[in-house]
Amino acid sequence: MIKRLILVLLLLTAMFGGIFGWKHFSGQKMAAMMAQPQPPATIAAVEVTLETWQPYLHAVGSVEATQGVSVTTEVPGQVREILAESGQHVEVGDIILQLDDSVDQAELDGLIAQHTLARLQFDRARKLVKDRSVSQSEYDQSRAQMDSAAATVTSKRAVIGKKVIRAPFSGQLGIVEVNLGEYLSPGATIVPLQALDPVFVDYTLPERHFAKVKVGQRVKVEVQAYPGRTFEGAISAINPGIESGTRSLRLRATLDNPDYLLRHGMFAEVRTVLPARDSILTLPRTAITYNPYGESVFIIEDKDGVQIVQRRPVKSGEMRAGRVEIVEGLQAGQQVVSAGQNKLRNGQAVSIDNSIKLEATVDGG
């Protein structure tokens, strides 16, 4: 019985000894593996570069025709002829519409005859007054009658002239809003007319930018109708005062528009060009790690022939076309990790490979 118990104890001792021995051996192997240096992390790198940036003042505004009216009639009448089409370009003085003037022409003939008679009577009185055959008052009366008849003829001709509706300036017609035979009252709208070359762009800027703008300063304009296309012009007028309700400054830019691409009422995105800024440090946006406590980058340093990374806080500025201005923290020529920084830590060795596309981090990883 005792021998059997001793045998069992020996077996248990051997079994547990083997287990503990294996655990100890595995732990030593694991520790040895952990003690070995990790292979360098593969990253993409980029240098901090100096660039010249063109700054702008951004605003929104509206395209305005340099001149725009609704062509109307000053006198009543029936539409006899429409001589312009909707959308047509007209020059100043071109006839747009003709009202019926047949009655006025007949009345004009009668008025001309009365004027002729008054002139003949005056000529007769002028000859007789020299011989004192007529009194001076009769002479004066005949002269007044002649002048009155001439004024009446002039007035009727003016009325007839107003029945010919002409373009007050060169521009683009809109949609004709009248029909042949339609009777028009004074002030009735016939067709809109707008001068579209050049055009104005009216916009506002905050009061703080007042000292940065002046007449003649270049502007760049984009409209939604032509994505990616930029129209250029210059500031042509600045309101002398600040609008008290919004504390904003109103400006007007003038743009050439030979193809009539810009139309009255279009929404415009306006960039007022400021003097260029030189020697701006920039990095791709992917090189910057954004955290609640600030921005940082991993700079690449050489240590005993091995490239390692160190996290460095930076202060960023304006962003443009995927690149970010670096205000503080870096110098031109320094190498920075641009992709692959999501698993990096301070002092870690890295291997640069810019031939592959790596996933960049945008958080604090």
Image (spheres, helix red, strand yellow):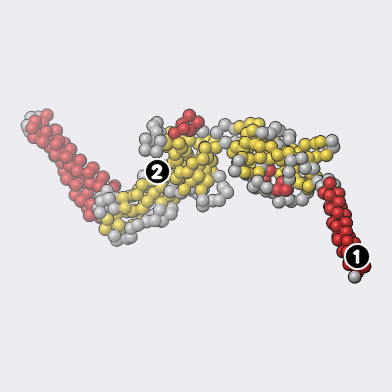
Picture coordinates of residue 32, whole percent (x, y): 86, 49
Q: Residues within 10 Å of mark 2 (few under 14, many from 20)?
A: some
Give the mark, 1 or 2, whose residue is nearer the N terminus. Answer: 1
> What amino acid is at disc 1?
Ile
Q: Which residue is mark 1?
A: 6
Q: Is residue 233 left or right of residue 78?
A: right
Is residue 34 or residue 147 the one in the foreground?
34
* Residue lying at the far front of the rendered structure: 2
Estimate the x, y position of residue 119 in percent, counting from the top left.
Answer: 17, 39
User: Which of the image's four quarters has the N terminus?
Assistant: bottom right
Q: Could you say whether the residue bearing mark 2 is in a helix, strand or loop?
A: strand
Q: Which residue is the extreme one toward the right?
A: 3
The amino acid pointed to by label 2 is Gln
Could you tell me if residue 128 is visible in this image?
no
Whole-percent x, y for residue 123 in the image: 16, 36
> In which image quadrant can residue 290 be found?
top right
Which quadrant of the structure image shows residue 331? top right
Taking the spot 47% from the left edge, 39% from the top edge, the residue there is 254
Residue placed at 72% from the left, 46% from the top? Answer: 341
**Position of residue 241 in the picture relative to residue 333 (left or right):** left
The label on residue 67 is 2
Question: What SS does tag 1 mark?
Answer: helix
In the rendered view, does 23 fall on the left or right side of 244? right
* Any part of residue 218 in sight: yes
Q: Residue at x 34, y 49 (%)?
A: 71
Q: Position of residue 137 (x, y in %)?
A: 8, 32
Outermost residue toward the bottom in this view: 1
